Image (cartoon, rainbow, N blue to C red):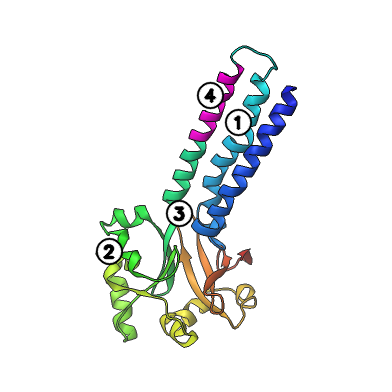
Amino acid sequence: MSRWRAGAIHFLISLAIFLGLLAVILLLWYPGILFNIDRGWTGLQLVIGVDLIAGPLLTLVVFKSGKKGLNFDLSCIAFFQAACMAAGMWVIYNERPIAIVLAYDTFYSVDREGFLQYERDPQVLEDFPGPYPKLIYIQLPESEIAAQIASMRAQFIGDPLYIQTENYRAMPDSVEGLRSVFRAEQTTRRGASENVLNQLDESCLFSKFISPVVSGFVCFNTDSRTLSKFYESASAAAIVEE
C-alpha cells in the first residue's frame, strides 16, 4: 500500500468520525442558529484541525509499506488524534449553552460556567421540560414600573436577572402566553432599524440577544418555538437564519 492510499483511508475514516461528532454538536449542543452565534464554530475548528488535517497528514508522512515499527507509529498517531479530538469535544461541550433565558427584554445564552460564576447550581435546569438548552423566562412583577425597577436593581447589585434561578419559569406553550412574557417587544422594535423590521413576519417575537461572543437581536419563532434569525445590530440585515 502506498502512503497516499494510507493517508486517503485515514482521511475517510476521520471524515466519518467527524461527521458523527458534527451531528452531535449541531443537533444536541448548538441547535438551530446557536452554532453560528454562540461559539459552536470556534470550538469546532480545533476538532477539524486535528481530525481532518493533522491525523491524516501524519499518516502520510510516516507511512512506508514494510517499515519497521510502522504499527507503533500508526498507533501513536491514532492515540494522539483521539486524545486531541476528545479534548476539543470536551471544550465544545463545556462551552455549550445550557439555558436560553429571556430576562425582561433580552435573551441571554448561559453556559455552565455562567451559572457557577454567580454561585448558582445549573442542576436547577433539570426541573424544566424539553431538551437542552432549556428555554426559560424570568418572572417579573406584573406592573411595568415594578418590572423596570427590578431590572435596574439587578444590574446595580451585580445579580443579573438572567441568573436569578429562583425566578426561572418555563416558556409558555401558547402563543398568547408567549406574547405576555415578551412584554418589552414593542420597545425593542423601536430600537431596531426599518431594514430589520421589514424582515420580520407575524410569527416573530423580537428581542435583544447576548451571548459570550455576540450581541444583537433575535427573532423567536412562535410556531417552531426556536430562535430563528439573528441580527447583528440595529442597522444590520439578518446574518443568520435557521
Q: Residues within 10 Å of mark 2 (few under 14, many from 20)?
A: few
Q: Is residue 82 above or below residue 123?
A: above
Distance from Cα at disc 4 to Cα at disc 3: 30 Å
Q: Is residue 76 magenta?
A: yes
Q: Check disc 3 and report the residue beneath it.
A: 96
Tell me where residue 2 appears, x and y as whole percent.
Answer: 75, 22
Mark 1 / mark 2, whichever is N-terminal:
1
**Looking at the image, is mark 4 or mark 3 nearer the viewer?**
4
Sequence-earlier tag: 1 or 4: 1
Q: Which residues are magenta?
A: 70-83
Residue position marked by numbered label 2 in the rendering: 159
Residue 129 falls in image quadrant: bottom left
Which one is in front, 199 or 6? 6
Mark 3 secondary-structure assignment: loop
Q: Position of residue 173 (x, y in %)?
A: 45, 81
Q: State the image quarter where residue 138 is shown.
A: bottom left
The secondary element bearing badge 1 is classed as helix
Choose the circle earlier in sequence order: 4 or 2.
Answer: 4
Residue 159, position in %: x, y? Answer: 27, 64
